[in-house]
Every structure is written in C-alpha cells, then in structure tokens.
Image (cartoon, rainbow, N blue to C red):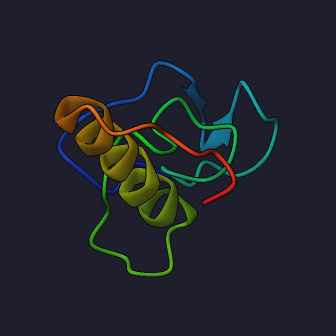
C-alpha cells in the first residue's frame, strides 16, 4: 500500500514482491527496514533504525562496537 510520495518497485498491486505479503513500508524484509524512520511509531523499522544509527555513531567516535549491547 503506497502511502507516501514515492513508489516502491517491489509493490505489485499492494503486495510486496520480496516478502510476498501486503506492502507495509519498513516491515521486516522490506528494503527500507532499518534504513528509514517512519512517522508510525509502531513501525518495526524504527527500532532497527535507532540501533543502526547508534552503531554508526559509536564507529564514528572510535568506540568498540559490542553487538550484544
């Protein structure tokens, strides 16, 4: 379901061609998962995005990254 100002090339009539279920941008398996923060606070992408940004910040600051953290 396209809710924004862009069209996903994997959205085929409302079904994601990658994960074979209703298109929900930011859901696990989506090409945007963890790469974008969505206004819907319940989007699973948001937590993954925050962790990704945290890891990048640690790397920029030269701190060791602990994947268990």
Task: State the residue in front, 55 or 40.
Answer: 55
Residue closest to the far top: 9
Q: Is residue 13 above or below residue 68?
A: above
Q: Position of residue 28 (x, y in %)?
A: 68, 48
Q: Residue at x 47, y 18 (%)?
A: 9
Q: Position of residue 42 (x, y in %)?
A: 50, 80
Using residue 39 as the reference point, say whether residue 46 is left or right of it. Answer: right
* Image quarter of the C terminus: bottom right
Q: Residue at x 56, y 23 (%)?
A: 10
**In the rendered image, the vertical position of residue 48 relative to residue 32, given as above or below:** below
Q: Residue furthest right?
A: 20
The picture places residue 45, in percent across and down from the top left corner, at 49, 56
Q: x%, y% of residue 5?
A: 17, 43
Please, is residue 39 above or below residue 58 in the view? below
Lateral position of residue 40 relative to residue 66, left or right: left
Left or right: where 18 falls relative to 51: right
> In this rendering, is residue 30 above or below 24?
above
Q: Nearer the viewer, residue 32 or 65?
A: 65
Q: Quadrant of residue 18?
A: top right
Residue sitting farthest toward the bottom: 41
**Is residue 53 toward the left or the right of residue 9 in the image?**
left
Who's the residue at 30% across and 43% down the image? 58
Q: How many marks?
A: 0
């Amino acid at each position: 379901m396209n809710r924004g100002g862009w069209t996903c090339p994997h959205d085929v009539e409302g079904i994601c061609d990658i994960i074979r279920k209703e298109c929900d941008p930011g859901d696990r398996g989506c090409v945007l998962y963890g790469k974008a923060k969505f206004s819907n606070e319940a989007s699973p992408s948001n937590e993954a995005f925050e962790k990704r940004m945290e890891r990048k910040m640690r790397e920029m600051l030269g701190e060791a990254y602990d994947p268990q953290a």
